[in-house]
Amino acid sequence: MISTTAEYALRMMIALAEANGDPLTSEQLSRRTDVSPDYAVKILQQLGRAKYVRAQRGRGGGFRLACDPRQTTLFDLVRVIDPLSRISTCPLGRKEHEGRLCALHASLDRTTGVLHDELRSLTLQDLLETSRAPMCSPCDEVVPLTFEGNGRGDRTIRR
Amino acid sequence: MISTTAEYALRMMIALAEANGDPLTSEQLSRRTDVSPDYAVKILQQLGRAKYVRAQRGRGGGFRLACDPRQTTLFDLVRVIDPLSRISTCPLGRKEHEGRLCALHASLDRTTGVLHDELRSLTLQDLLETSRAPMCSPCDEVVPLTFEGNGRGDRTIRR
DNA sequence: TGAAATATGGATAGATGTGTCGTATTTAAT
DNA sequence: ATTAAATACGACACATCTATCCATATTTCA
């Protein structure tokens, strides 16, 4: 849904927001969020170029939050990393539906819109308020995949 | 949101559903959906192993639909290709929140749930009904990414 | 001024997703 | 039986995502 890297970015933004404007080094951020040190730096650089964090070099330096957690949504942050694009036109050049999408792409685009609205409805502050406990890391629950074709089977696979 | 491959799978399932039980060769499906012939075969094989299509080899053969379009949802089809998994537990072993997720992962999981519900609410038949016009292909509209940190800037980048 | 701490940026490596190719196997028509 | 049409399957190529490593630039402190 969102990339691993985008999720890492969110973890680090939360950690920075919890620091209340104090700088945290990439090393500290890495430890608090369980993102590998080198990769954490890469992501922080992207967040820096997008002006969501500010970096300070040298002893005593680090990264600090450069945005208002109340006005910064998950949508804002995720799209620093992921494209988060919508389906808008049919590039196939099929004249039959210039200007409108076929049912498939209209549906997929509407679904994408729902996802975007969800991400837009959540601010960094929203996450802070219920997140005073240290962050957990995600894990994937495998939804059993039936092999019946009508949704009522029992064979499952792992992927 | 869903992978390119999963979207190809949906295109081909629609084409097969429109064929009303008649077999279509991989070549025909490829042409109708603008998926490259070789890759189309790969995807059709996955759909076949999941029992959503049936393959018939030899002259006069091809692929035909093996499920009821009224009962088959986009969720069913997409997860043949994509994991579509939920965040369920914190594997980090941090004892503080055993059994419950922190705000970040709870939010992301809830967002994932919304997406899954959307896909579950749409059947193959739903797409057919408004899709008698041939399918279009998707294209990505780039959402402008501001570099302000407060969501009110104007500089944009392409990615 | 030197040393230590810190971020920056480029190069590289591994994993996964996307796409192509060649050969084998099955089936139907003749 | 033979042949043509079609799928099955494994190997390979390429791009992108994820992650690591190294050399360099900047800043602070002693």
Image: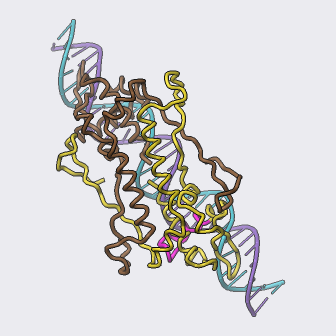
Chain colours: A brown, B yellow, C purple, D cyan
Which residue is drawn at the image coordinates 49% and 36% (left, top)?
A138
Which residue is drawn at the image coordinates 54% and 34% (left, top)?
B89
Q: Relative to residue A54, is residue B27 depicted above or below?
A: below
- Of residues A124 and D5, the one nearer the viewer is A124
- Of residues B131 and A66, the one nearer the viewer is B131
Q: Which residues are magenta?
A: B30-44
Residue B61 pos. (x, y %):
68, 78
Magenta: predominant secondary structure element?
A: helix
Report if residue B36 lies within the magenta region. Answer: yes
Which residue is drawn at the image coordinates 30% and 23% (left, top)?
A19
Which residue is drawn at the image coordinates 63% and 71% (left, top)?
B65
Residue A73 pos. (x, y %):
30, 41
Q: Relative to residue B78, is residue B31 depicted above or below?
A: below
Residue B151 pos. (x, y %):
22, 44
Asked if residue A71 lies left or right of residue B56, the reply is left
Q: Quadrant of residue A131?
A: top left
